[in-house]
Image: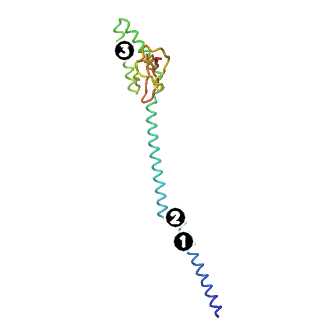
Amino acid sequence: MSDNKDKKAEEKLNKQEEDSSKVVDKQEVKEDEPTTEQLLAEEKDRFLRLFAEFENYKKRTAKERLELFKTANRELMSALLPVLDDFDRALAEIKKSDDDDHFKGVKLIADKFKKTLEQKGLTKMKVKSGDAFDADRHQAITQIPAPSKKLKGKIIDVTEQGYTLGDTIIRFPKVVVGN
């Protein structure tokens, strides 16, 4: 009978171990599955990241659109610069003659043309003799011996004006540099 009791006690013990292992398995399964709070936190994080990404996209496209508007006239302005140069040459030649009425008429048209281009964002670069030569902002067409030591490595003469459209240089000033 003692054998019988031992067997029953052993069976009971085995059954308890099986039940406890099932409980442990259920707990492991529960630990592997994310809770509602975890799921909610993950979705909230995804939403915030997506929202931030969209805000960055909006800012980037607005900046690109603004830049496009600023430089949309670049080709047209580049094509009109030789006409502007011709006006300057014409004014210089007419000024040499004694015809003041002719000079005033051409000057009026040239000023109106320049004002219209300036309203569209075109600005003349300020370059004069004696300024330091900067290869990033000037185009050297030739080098000549400097008339004085002060002008060595500096701009001696400006042969063609440079222009910017917004912050972009659309034509570099052509200069003569002292050597």
- Locate residue 85: give its quadrant: top left
Per the image, label 3 sits on a secondary structure element best described as: helix
Q: Amino acid at mark 2?
A: Pro
Kindly check if marks 2 and 1 are in contact, taking CB atoms under 8 A apart as contact: no
Q: Residue at x 44, y 46 (%)?
A: 55
Circle 3 residue = 107
Residue at numbered disc 2: 34
**Residue 92 in picture, x, y percent from top left:** 39, 11
Q: Name the mark nearer the viewer: 3 or 1.
A: 1
- Distance of mark 2 from mark 1, alpha carbons? 12 Å
Q: Is residue 14 left or right of residue 37?
A: right
> SS of the residue at dot 2?
loop
Nearest the eye: 24 or 79: 24
| Residue type pointed to by label 1 | Gln
Disc marking residue 27: 1
Residue 39: x and y, percent? 49, 61
Whichever of callouts 2 and 1 sits on the residue coming sooner in the sequence is 1
Question: Callout 1 environment at 10 Å: few (<14), some (14 to 19), or many (20+)?
Answer: few
Q: Quadrant of the N terminus?
A: bottom right
Q: Position of residue 3 (x, y in %)?
A: 65, 91
